[in-house]
Amino acid sequence: QDKLLQAARQFTLAKCATDGWSFTTGFVWTRYEADQDSVKRFPNLPYLEAAWRDIHESLRVVIAKSRQMRVSWLLAAYCVWFARFHDHKQILWQTQKEEDANTMVCLPGSEKDGGYAARMQFILRHLPPWLKGTWKESEGELSCKETSSTIIALPGGANQVRSKTATIIVEDEFAFQAEQAGVYQAVAPLIQKATKFIAISTPNGRANQFSDLYHGV
């Protein structure tokens, strides 16, 4: 029986390594503060699966979203999955305010302390140990021991990304970042060298870099 369990886990681990959507819908739990039944399995919805496929298959992805669409949770799960199953990668998550970026990636306080977890921390804490792997947590950063890949939270600003060579750059609420045009100018050469650029935001009018990217200007 132990051998069967071990074989099943190895099969599932191998499947998750190549199919991030199966990882997300099978093992990711999310937290909805506005709902009394706040902890739920990630929803297996067609539009979220389509967004996942686009994110994974494209180098530049721009998503206009509204609240409660689960897009931020989708990207949090994608970042965790990518770092867990891809070696020596760096993922950057940038928002205007550092504390908002940290709230997505990692907040201080260990799981034993029972502290409030950032979204990616929350995802990791609800994975089974045989799938989760070993992670180092520090404020604004998560590092996976098995792959030597990291996820780093950044405040807004072109200088924050200009000196970094990342595998994935996520720009959260990009339409509201003060230096969004400078940020895109800084990362555009990296996109040409295969860095994945993902910009998500609620709309903020038409006179901004996010709007230009979304409308293909």
Image (cartoon, grey):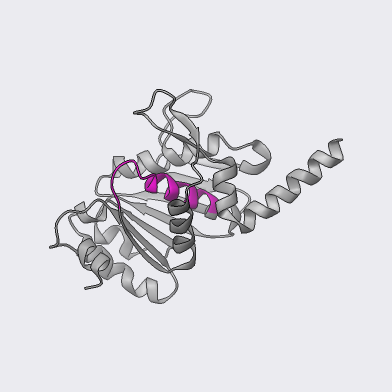
Report the span colored magenta: 65-81
- Write the residue at 48% across / 38% down: 121
Residue 73: % across, % down: 42, 44
Vertical relation: 6 (above or below) 11: above
Residue ID at (44%, 25%): 37
Residue 144 shows in this picture: no
Asked if the magenta segment contains residue 72, the reply would be yes
Q: Is residue 8 above or below residue 206?
A: above
| Residue drawn at the location 28% of the way across and 47% of the way down | 66
Q: Quadrant of residue 197?
A: bottom left
The image shows residue 54 at horizontal and vertical percentages of 45, 63
Q: Is residue 203 left or right of residue 13?
A: left
Q: Residue 95, relative to residue 196: is it above or below?
A: above
Identify the image quadrant of residue 187: bottom left
Q: How far from the left and from the top, in percent, is residue 17? A: 63, 55
Magenta stretch holds residue 190: no
- Is 204 or 157 nearer to us in this picture? 204
- Would residue 100 appear left or right of 169 to someone viewing this image? left
> For residue 19, which quarter of the picture?
bottom right
